[in-house]
Image: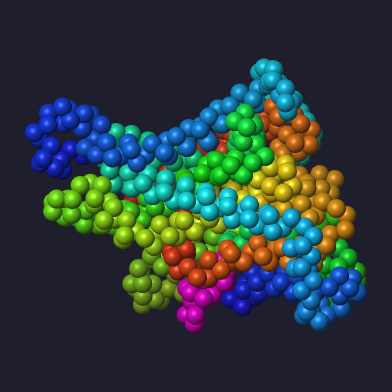
Amino acid sequence: MAISTAQLPGELTNRPGRVGLKRVLGPDYRMAYLFITPIVLLVLSLVAYPFTYAIYLSMTHKLVGLPPVFVGFENYIRLTWDGFFQRAVVNSFIFTFGSVGFKLVLGVVMALVLTANIRWRSFWTGVLLIPWVAPTVVSALNFLWIFDGSLGVLNYVLVRVLGVLPQGLGWLSEPGLAMASVVAVNIWRGFPFFGISFLAGMKAIPAELYEAAEVDGASVVQRFRHITLPGIRNIMIIVVLLSTIWTFNDFQIIYILTKGGPGGTTMVMPVFTYETAFGAQRLGEAIAVALYLLPALAVTIMVLARYMRKGRKA
Amino acid sequence: MLVTLALVVLFPFYWMTITSFKSEEQMRSVVSMFWPKPIVTENYHQLLSKTDFAAWYGNSVFVAVSSTLVATSVGTIGAYALARLRFLGRGFMASATLITYLVPPSILFIPLYAQMRNLGLANSLAGLIAAYPSFTVPFVTWLLMGYFESIPEELEEAAMIDGATRFGAFYRIVLPLSAPGVLAAGLYAFTQAWNEFLYALVFITDGRLRTLPVGLASFITGDVYGWGYLMAGAVLTTLPVIAAYIYLQKYMVEGLTAGGVKG
């Protein structure tokens, strides 16, 4: 953070008291603090305070409507050995990395398709971005209907139109299929964000680089590997980290499609948190679930924030 | 390739729309799968007359508009301070805002719920309006910081040399120039508030006070889902967002790429 005092407007020099404050707090401090106060208040009351309170609550036995009883790390220790919790952690990682991996690939494909020489580019860009703008709940409900075992259109197409399956599958009700189905929905909703970000990155790569490479006889694949990929490397890191946080904490898709079922095969940590808090009414333990991987989340956020600020300054 | 992607992207919306115009009969007997024959509007009548959908719509509009106004005004001045003004603590606040944007709601929803209960704001739309700035404000601020930084500083300097105050330079020069950015940020805030699910699910217990996403999801708690009117509700819930998006696509795409990532 740099405070520059080089550009002080001349009128200030004849007000010695102010100059002293300005030297310490910065030349624009009065307007700045006025403008920044609402954000400070919001961050303190809506994020910092609840977050601190959450850490405290996670170390208590707290039932809804009753005062909390402090128990130290007991919730965390118990969770560590809880089979349901362990499975939720594993499922969360499967859900997250399965989704993010495919979103990355599809995002690159989308960006490449949109940088190719096509007509109505902005129209197609707009169309492909729709899943990202539409309400997630609506999309999840759409897929609940599409996946429906008896009347859903997916089974109809596969069995009656294409004839590739002898009979319909329970996309959300068969333990072996449910995770793949919810991952597919998350990919569907999330890949446009990857695509649009990569597209912006690719547009920023100077065309001369490609022309020079072409003159030197580089193939399309070589140009992609040695010019495009390095050119969008920073954006890729940012988008993958952002999406990892978002996907790991995605609640709506699984809550609506499976509620963690069948038999817990799609139970992920956010839904487990919700069930513990509002199903079992154990708030302290629920928050311990939400905060269990806090160290990993904190590291991810710090790295990501650094990249995002660096990306801005460049 | 492009066409395949577009089909995959659009199919669920096409399916939602035609389902909303089918009768229960048509769905049960699996006839006229890909185009409803005849087209019936009965689902929409049912939805509006027999459910609380209209009330939910009002709630969603109220909550989304209020939180958009809060987020846009607080975010605009805050972003200007963080992007342009020189003061002690600027770097720290810029980082704090960004980190706040990255903290997921799944960590905050229980303590926020407890906090709203203590304030007597649980189970009220005011509670949602109070909570939504936790994600809309940091996002708007981050997005507009990028926008303000892209406006040449010389414009304000010139205005101040001509006698404008710092505030005057912001109000008369920077703000009008940033109108598209503020508009895009406001639309995103609206979309986020309109689509929000978790806080609304947890905070609101009274059926009539639900917002649209939670209300729609509540249709699936029974064993027999009325797919027709559920999809009719889904269509009506998606419309404002998509309409705003189509109308202002250029700004929103630019805003997203400028605000989310850049570099």
Q: Position of residue B68 (x, y in %)?
A: 50, 52
Tell whether B86 sits left or right of A190: left
Q: Position of residue B119 (x, y in %)?
A: 59, 30
Relative vertical location of residue B196 with respect to residue A202 in this rendering, above or below: above
Q: Main secondary structure of the magenta part?
A: helix
Residue B257 shows in this picture: no
Q: Compare residues B173 and A304 and report the one nearer the observer.
A: B173
A125 drawn magenta: yes
Q: Compare residues B238 and A110 and report the one nearer the observer.
A: B238
For image coordinates 74% across by 55% down, the residue present is B52
Residue B109 shows in this picture: yes
Relative vertical location of residue B153 with respect to residue A142 in this rendering, above or below: above
Q: Compare residues B206 and B191 and report the one nearer the observer.
A: B206
For image coordinates 64% across by 25% down, the residue present is A57
Q: Compare residues A288 and B167 and report the one nearer the observer.
A: B167
Tell whether A218 sits left or right of B117: left
For image coordinates 81% across by 48% down, the residue present is A261
Say which quarter of the image contains residue A67. Answer: top right
B227 drawn magenta: no
Relative vertical location of residue B248 with respect to residue A72 in this rendering, above or below: below
Q: Position of residue B230 (x, y in %)?
A: 76, 62
Q: Quadrant of the N terminus of chain B?
A: bottom right
In this view, the residue farthest toward the front is B49
Q: Which residues are magenta?
A: A114-131
For image coordinates 33% across by 38% down, the residue present is A34
Q: How many marks?
A: 0
Relative vertical location of residue A280 with respect to residue A222 in this rendering, above or below: above
